[in-house]
Image: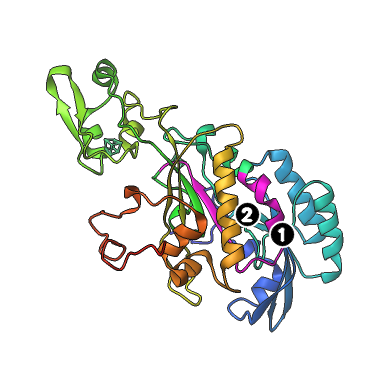
Amino acid sequence: MISQFAPTDIGPPHYWDKMPEMSKKNYGQWQYHEYLKPGVMKHVGPAGALYTVRVGSPRLLSIETLRWFADIADKYCDGKLRFTSRHNVEFLLEDESKIDALVEEVEAAGWPVGGTGKSLKNMLHTQGWVHCHSAATDASGTVKAVMDDLFEYFKKDDLPAKLKISMACCLNMCGAVHCSDIAWVGIHRKIPRVNDAEVAHSCEIPNIIASCPKAAIKPNPKAKSVTINEEKCMYCGNCFSVCPALPIADPENDGIAIFVGGKVSNARTAPTFSKLAVPYIPNEPPRWDTLVKTIRHLVEVWVENARKGERYGEWIERIGWEKFFELTGLEFTDKHIDDFTFSVKTFHTGNGFKFTK
Ligand code: SF4
Ligand code: SF4
């Protein structure tokens, strides 16, 4: 029998072997943590303290950059670093006296230290036009444009609460759009275009039909192809994943929707799903001006109006969604009415929904 810990070339090494010594000693016994300054944290347990320096990364990194990070970890942290789910690199040190030199060297090379406490976290994003076949917008491009604009908030620690912004480039949502304070998602708005001749030559009809979560695809025996019911289609692009003869990408109609108010944390209030704020913004590469302006506006209205400690969704729940639309000046449209099968909890169509102006 192969031991769970036997060395193999399958999968990653066992996590215990790669942990900092202080993490092993304090394992399961951590007592508290502090934010020493933006980007620097201290975690304390009975065996002592472990310091973390958080460095924002753009997610797509070259081998040269990874080797450079590894060299920094060797120099200051006994070779220990880790990546967070928001694409930060975290250097983990036991020696507090090395923190300033590490921060200085990393920042001198152009890497920002920040994103802890009540700051803007590094943005979570997906593959975009660079890598994924079903993207309705770009990931790295939109995030670069928005983060360039909001960068000041990554370096500060004085927002009402932590601010997590995410993006996903289609509604299959590899990014955390459904549970972030502010998020945008790429949306297709037209059904896939069926190329009958290509479907007949290169795709398996049963596979195409099975790929559709809305049962919108039917066989078209005469053409040895399929037809798509426009009423049922939700523009997810799953059928295109199994059959390249059903392209869905459309430069004229694809774009972005913005969601707000989600969170994963159960601190103070229960975790919540994000809700629609802006139904559609066209793709505007290379700098996505409307998206950038809208996200900054959403951040600034929250900063001006939220109480200390109030996450984005908590602020909206306190003031009410009607007030949120009034304060932000966003248009309320039929797209904001949730008529999904399981929408009972979010259905907001009763006489309680009243704008004050
Ligand atoms: Fe691909 Fe959609 Fe995931 Fe983006 S969100 S990487 S388009 S599956
Ligand atoms: Fe079905 Fe999605 Fe294809 Fe529409 S895009 S037909 S919902 S699989």
The spot of residue 30 in percent (x, y) is 63, 79
Residue at screen point 53% across, 61% down: 5
Q: Which mark is residue 122?
A: 2
Crowding near the residue tagged with mark 2, few <14, some 14–19, many ≥20 C-alpha atoms within 10 Å: many
Of the image marks 1 and 2, the number of the one nearer the N terminus: 1
The spot of residue 189 in percent (x, y) is 35, 35
Q: Which mark is residue 114?
A: 1
- Amino acid type assigned to the residue bearing label 2 in the image: Asn
Residue at screen point 26% across, 21% down: 199
Residue 351 appears in the rendering: yes
Asked whether, in this view, residue 308 is left or right of residue 171, the answer is right
Helix or strand or loop: what does disc 2 sit on?
loop
Residue 2 appears in the rendering: no
Give how far apart the Cα atoms at labels 1 and 2 are.
Answer: 9 Å
Look at the image and give the residue range highlighted in magenta. Answer: 146-170
Up the image or down, 284 lies above or below 269; here it is above
